[in-house]
Amino acid sequence: VLEIAGLEDEGDTPDKRLTVRFNTCLGACSQAPVMSLDHHLAGRVNPESAAKNVAHLLEQDGHGE
């Protein structure tokens, strides 16, 4: 995810389109590991699916608007 986002650690991308934060609890342990994308949870992710989710999000026009 960090590589796809062009980041070395958590934080905002330079264009402010993406924020990466490491979190200990999103309240969805039964679906762990979990990531949140635009306030929607994606469960049972692995490194490959997490990277695909982020790449897809960044490809969308008007993301975050």
Image (tube, rainbow, N blue to C red):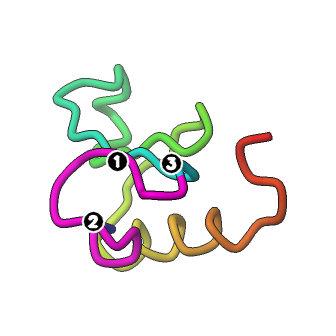
On the picture, is 52 further left or further right than 26? right
**Magenta region:** 2-15
Q: Check residue 31 for magenta coloring.
A: no
The CA span between labels 2 and 3 is 21 Å
Image quadrant assignment for residue 45: bottom left
Q: At x 77% / y 66%, what residue is drawn?
A: 60
The CA span between labels 1 and 3 is 15 Å
Q: Position of residue 10 (x, y in %)?
A: 22, 48
| 1 or 3: tag closer to the N-terminus | 1
Q: Check residue 13 for magenta coloring.
A: yes
Tell me the residue that label 2 is attached to. Answer: 7
Tell me the residue that label 1 is attached to. Answer: 20
Q: At x 21% / y 40%, what residue is drawn?
A: 22
Q: Circles 1 and 2: CB distance less than 8 Å?
A: yes
| 1 or 2: tag closer to the N-terminus | 2
> Which kind of residue does numbered mark 2 sit on?
Leu
Q: At x 36% / y 44%, what residue is drawn?
A: 34
Q: Nearer the viewer, mark 2 or mark 3?
A: 2
Image quadrant assignment for residue 25: top left
> Which kind of residue does numbered mark 3 sit on?
Ala
Q: Nearer the viewer, mark 1 or mark 2?
A: 2
Q: Tell me, for residue 42, which label it has, or none.
A: 3
